[in-house]
Image (tube, helix red, strand yellow):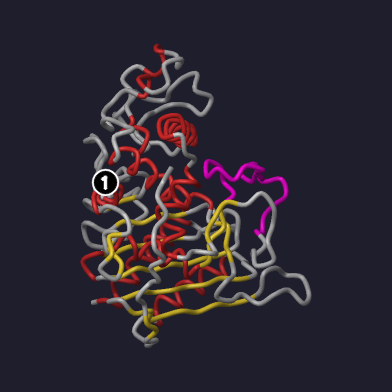
Amino acid sequence: MLPNKELIPMPLTSEISNQFDPVIEHVHQTYRANHCSGAAVMVIHQDNVVAETYWGHHSLNEGARAIQKDTQFHVASVRKSYIGFAVAYAVHHGYISSIDDPVSDYIPELDASVFQGTTIRHLVTHTHGLKDDGLGRDFLPGESWSYRIIGIELLCRIIYEKTGLTVAQILSKEVFEPLGFKETGWYAAPQDNFIEVMRDPNNPHWKTFDTTDGDKMNMYVSARELAQWGYLHLKQGNIRGNQIVPQEIIKLATTLQSPTLKDKDLPQNGFLWFVKDHAAKHSEIGDLVPKGSYQILGFSNVALLVIPDYDTVVVRAFNSWGSAAGYEYLPDIKGFGDCVMGCLK
């Protein structure tokens, strides 16, 4: 069992300024481009909340609740930053000996002819090459990069089988409870403060789940708690002089773990976070964002960017599912980071 931890509230104060107005406008343009019903943006800079803005309503229905501080957004793949934390927790505490261990050491029944040479490092950096059916691969491990769900499923299985804890249990005890998070979690049923996900009912990427173990795509987070999650990482796990989680866990999760790839324009990753080591054409992190920064982006266009060199965390949140016609997510998310840097410089 994990020990209970003392509640340590975030030491953030609110000093709203107009320094980040261009970021607010950038987020507002994305909100309009994707025909969202609501959106939010929050910026933490030098331990202060310097921008916090909410637009619209929880749905397009008449009388729908206005977007507000406790509104929870479906964060889609942003959830992977929490799974990355759970993997780093397992490594730090010795449940996983090394991320260079073969995946088959932890799940022996895997087909050796398919999984040969595939390590946990390959899973956390999207460089495993496995097809989602687990029956074949698109490339040999470590030779390229591909964003596939099978890597996430294998990681969650390893975490549970080695620690005896679900991803949700690890995060709850290590982070959510000590920081008093009430607007972050995995849910089997809608809550009153959920914003409706605007989507095509035939979109194949949308699914609902009954499990709340933290291994599925049913995570909802408010913009303010997502920013605080980023702030915990920015501060290397130390809040008010209290080391909430070991610094080594944060470092593992947010520093470059990708194997050396021949194509330098492919994304770079830590433990599922996208990290900035060098400018890359296919990276989601803006070209102006400095080395050492890290970011996570979801299919709902929710994003969390952490820029340690500038002591800054930025969140944008929407309720679109995918992209509207004419909207290209990669230029937009890179432009988001570059807009933040324009404000900082």
User: Magenta-highlighted stretch: main secondary structure?
Assistant: loop
Measured along the vertical axis of the image, is residue 179 above or below residue 284?
below
Measured along the vertical axis of the image, is residue 132 above or below residue 286?
above
Quadrant position of the C terminus in the picture: bottom left
In terms of image quadrants, where is residue 34? bottom right
Q: Residue 31 in the image: x percent, y percent?
A: 55, 69
- Who's the residue at 32% across and 63% down the image? 306
- Who's the residue at 49% across and 53% down the image? 298
Depth check, front residue: 242 or 249: 242
Depth check, front residue: 275 or 308: 308
Depth check, front residue: 15 or 34: 15
Residue farthest to the right, as pictured:
62
Q: Residue 327 in the image: x percent, y percent?
A: 53, 59
Quadrant position of the N terminus in the picture: top left
Q: Amino acid at mark 1?
A: Leu
Q: Residue 328 in the image: x percent, y percent?
A: 49, 57
Label 1 secondary element: helix
* 163 sits to left or right of 192: left
Q: How many marks?
A: 1
- Who's the residue at 21% across and 66% down the image? 309
In terms of image quadrants, where is residue 247? bottom left
Q: Which residue is mark 1?
A: 252
For the record, the magenta segment spans: 197-218
Q: How many other residues sit within 10 Å of disc 1, few (<14), some (14-19) or many (≥20)?
A: some
In terms of image quadrants, where is residue 10? bottom left
Q: Residue 342 in the image: x percent, y percent?
A: 29, 75
Q: Inspect the magenta stretch and tell me whether residue 214 lies in it.
A: yes
Q: Inspect the magenta stretch and tell me whether residue 321 lies in it.
A: no
* 169 sits to left or right of 243: right
* 214 sits to left or right of 286: right
